[in-house]
Image (tube, rainbow, N blue to C red):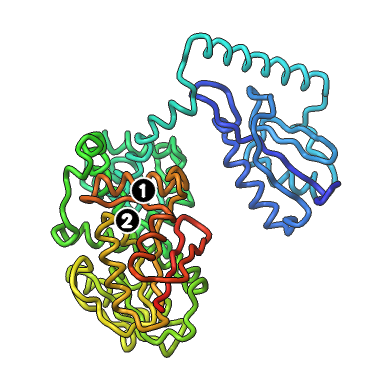
Amino acid sequence: MEPFRFHVFVCDQQKPEGAPCCAARGSGQVLEALRREVNARGLEDEVQVTACGSLGLCEHGPNLVVYPEGVWYSGVTPADVPEIVRSHFEEDTPVERLARTDPAAVRAEILHNREKMFAARRAREAAGVLPDDLNERIRAFQESRVVLTALELDLFTAVGDGAGAAEVAASVHTDPRSTEMLLNALASLRLIVKHEGVFHNSPAAARYFTAGSRDNARPALLHTAHLWQRWSTLTDSVRAGTAVAHDEIAGRGPDWTEAFIAAMHRNASERAPLVVRAVGTENVRRMLDVGGGSGAYSIAFAQANPALRADILDLATVEPIARRHIQDAGVADRVDVRAGDLRSGRLGEGYDLVFVSAICHMLDPAENLDLLRRCHEALAPGGRVVIQDFILEADKTAPRFAALFALNMLVGTRGGASYSEPEYAGWLGEAGFREIRHARLPGITGLMIGSRT
């Protein structure tokens, strides 16, 4: 079966530092150039490009193989890609200067490299050496810290269209020597490209990390940078059973609050259409958004139903941020914000929908049961409560993101955690809800829905 006229496999195998491999020789750039050129020439329906593991010719990479003919290319650079696409894919003429034409020699080289790999693996196993994947996971914080520091310093904006280390240092008020070290590290992560002493942003860095870009995620990602100190207390928090450096959101500075709400707004804006479709807006005239943050979900519900009016309940420090987003969305006449503490007091009455997103993980079980009882009181007969959160399976080991997020709540709250579907169902039932169900969504969150009879 040949669903495509050509199928290209490009080795993008990454190996430990010092070991020859295609990734170290620039296979990622070749892969990107190949996909770009195929699309530019309108061949995407004829040529399938697939990244693959080692092809066994490690010393001569980057390597790729083209089927159905089985033409092997070695030493391919991004500059070679237009010629390969034009000559081989459009004119059916392989590029001879790059092609491997001796099958016996190719086979012998692959078998030789395979045996070297097996021998090295046996030696490492006998010596009890830590496996590479486990070692990389343990040291992964180093790469994360490099990127977070660059974001905190707004380094990518300073690099702009290209700058030397001294120029970047002067722009962000840092030491030139240490700034160059950081830029070099970012280049090793392929977020920065260095050419003759001048640093340039990669396409991804320019799109997501620079001021003025439509998709700039830096304001939201600064919340992740703020989590760094909290996660450094994990050992002490596990010993204590709670956060050892806890303080309420209302007591944190405006920079923290802005970054936190920006992160929540970015996530909510992405997921809001999924939630609105899953919940529906039919027969919803009044909605309460408990701890609604930026108002992204209330805005989405209001935009989906012109007759819907929403109230957002959140802290006084969040209220002006929410009003700003509501005004920008043009729904200020139907979406309102009131300051309050979701942990206590009546929530109101007569609502058709009470939406509780990314709140339950901040609370302990008793607080969640109390909140859901007050949500039940706030609903009109036939109304629904919808909880959106990271919902664990019954044994609490999956999904992985939710299991890790439980630790994020351990280091940052008094008694918060990620909770399982049976826990949510139990609280909802005890609070008086019926027709309880788990609505699974694409991505990392799901919905628990209950109705008031």
User: Looking at this view, is 98 or 118 the one in front?
Assistant: 118
Q: Earlier in the sequence, mark 2 or mark 1?
A: 2
The three-letter code of the residue at mark 1 reads: Phe
> In this rendering, is residue 113 above or below 13?
above
Residue behind mark 2? 361
Q: Which mark is residue 221?
A: none
Towards the viewer: 411 or 453? 453
Q: Is residue 248 left or right of residue 95?
A: left
Dot label at residue 405: 1
Residue 176 visible in image: no
Cα–Cα span, label 2 and label 1: 9 Å
- Residue drawn 38% across and 59% down? 426
Q: Within the image, what quadrant is residue 397 found in?
A: top left
Between 327 and 389, the one lying in front of the other is: 389
Residue 208: % across, % down: 42, 56
- Residue drawn at (29%, 61%), measured in percent from left and top? 368
Residue under the point 76% across and 49% down: 86
Q: On the picture, is 120 further left or further right than 361?
A: right
Which quadrant of the structure image shows residue 303?
bottom left
Inspect the image, locate mark 2, and give the three-letter code of the amino acid beneath it: His
Q: State the residue lying farthest toward the left.
A: 251
Q: Position of residue 18 (x, y in %)?
A: 50, 21
**Is residue 366 placed above or below 27 in the rendered structure?**
below
Query: From what the image shows, is residue 330 above or below residue 235?
Result: below
Question: Hey, which quadrant is residue 138 in on the image?
Answer: top left
Residue 364 in sight from this viewpoint: yes
Residue 267: x and y in percent read 40, 61
Assign a secondary structure to mark 2.
Answer: helix
Judge the density around disc 2: few (<14), some (14-19), many (≥20) Cα neighbours within 10 Å.
many
Nearer to us: label 2 or label 1: 2
SS for dot 1: helix
- 445 lies left or right of 169: right
